Amino acid sequence: MNQFIVKLTIFCWLLSIATLKAQTFKSQHLEYLGGLLQGKCTLPKTTKYFSCNAINMPIHVEYNSSGEIEHLGLVIFSQDIKNNLGKTIANFQERLFLEVLLQKNDENAKMLLTEYKIEVLLQNPLPGTAPFMREIEKSLKFASEQAHEYVLTKDSLYWTSTWHNEHSDFSLRFPANYDLILGMDKKELEDKFEIDLLNSDCKINEQDVIVVNLANLIEIKKGVFEKVGKDLFVKKMNASTFFMQNEMGGAQLIYNTKLPIESISNILLHLNEKSKNIYLDIFHKTYGSNVKKYEVELYQLLCYFKDKYETFVGIEYFSAESIKLSVIFRSLEYNCIHLLYIETKPENIFNKKENWTSTLYTYIPNQNIKNIYKEFSKNKIDINF
């Protein structure tokens, strides 16, 4: 009888491993979470809410069109909140707390939150030494079942989530680190970035004419006016756009072969038809000193970055034969930037016959990019990449 029980246990263990291996995951972290659930419950083979005896909360598994598991986490947010909030931040929190509640003990759960630099303010914690994971579970049930309002805020480095009703609240504060929130390592993210960019079908309905008052602009040289934008690290890396007076006495964006520097800045900072049919040969520097090479339309690239990034342009070198510049896309959601270095001929800004040569660096932590600019003077940009 004992031998039968041992054999049955081994069979069930082997079966659970085979089931896990048969499923594919979008990231290594999701596969790790699937491994934590191994032996506790079986993952459904389709998108579904399910129960697990090891956790007193429902779990959600979601598959993408390729059959990969793309989300695995506790059920905390309603679909309405996810639609308004965006799935990325919501899925991160659901994934995080599944991982916390799957830890072996309270000490491991606290260590995990410390490792991720996450602060948790529990909902009405019990006095004394109540089990930490039990308190987490109680607070999460409050968040998903009793809270009347959910608020998400961000400062320069952290996101803060707060659930509350008239009696109590529950909150957590987590760093705006792209790898933590997206649940992928740099290589996985760089692969995903290329796929998402090349497959994006972004379009806007935006007019060439911007309504501005010349009186509110700075005339930097005769007939050329600057709408001063924010700068990043140095004044030469900025979001300024340039105008000239039109026949009606108003202002129009500069797009003029006699003013290539102002023209290319406007093209990069104000998305419109001018960036269509301009193509970039991109050399994407990725993890492990690898290089991905692909071609993308400038309009498509700028549109891809439009809503969730701030764009800054810095002209590094200009002559009749060459223009070199850097474009920084700073994420509004994460503590990182993407850096695009462009080199082309001034004539290619207008005739669109030759592709622009460019080098792309993605997912650079904010604190690292500052080192690139520490040698800048106020009046000169001099970078070697």
Image (cartoon, helix red, strand yellow):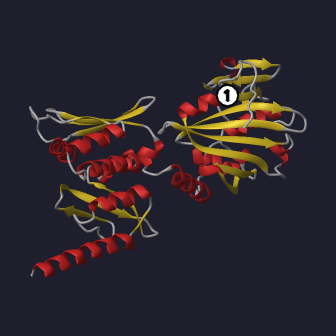
Q: Nearer the viewer, residue 299 or 197?
A: 197
Q: Quadrant of residue 19?
A: bottom left
The answer to whether residue 337 is above or below residue 195 is above
Look at 43% across and 58% down and name the residue there. 28
> Can you give x and y, in whole percent of width and height, for residue 135 in the image?
16, 41
The three-letter code of the residue at mark 1 reads Met
Q: Residue furthest front?
A: 3
Answer yes or no: is residue 307 visible.
Answer: yes
**Element type at mark 1:** strand
Q: Quadrant of the N terminus?
A: bottom left
Residue drawn 45% across and 40% down? 177
**Residue at 46% of width from left, 29% of height from top?**
156
Residue toward you, 256 or 305: 305
Give x and y (percent) for residue 232.
Answer: 61, 27
| Quarter of the image where the C terminus is located | top right
x 41%, y 49%: residue: 88
Could you tell whether 66 is left or right of 121 in the image? Answer: right
Taking the image as shown, residue 147 lies to the left or right of residue 380, namely: left
- The image quadrant that residue 262 belongs to is top right
Residue 21: x percent and y percent?
38, 71
Task: Confirm whether residue 71 shows in the render.
Answer: no
* 10 up-or-down from 359: above or below: below
Residue under label 1 = 237
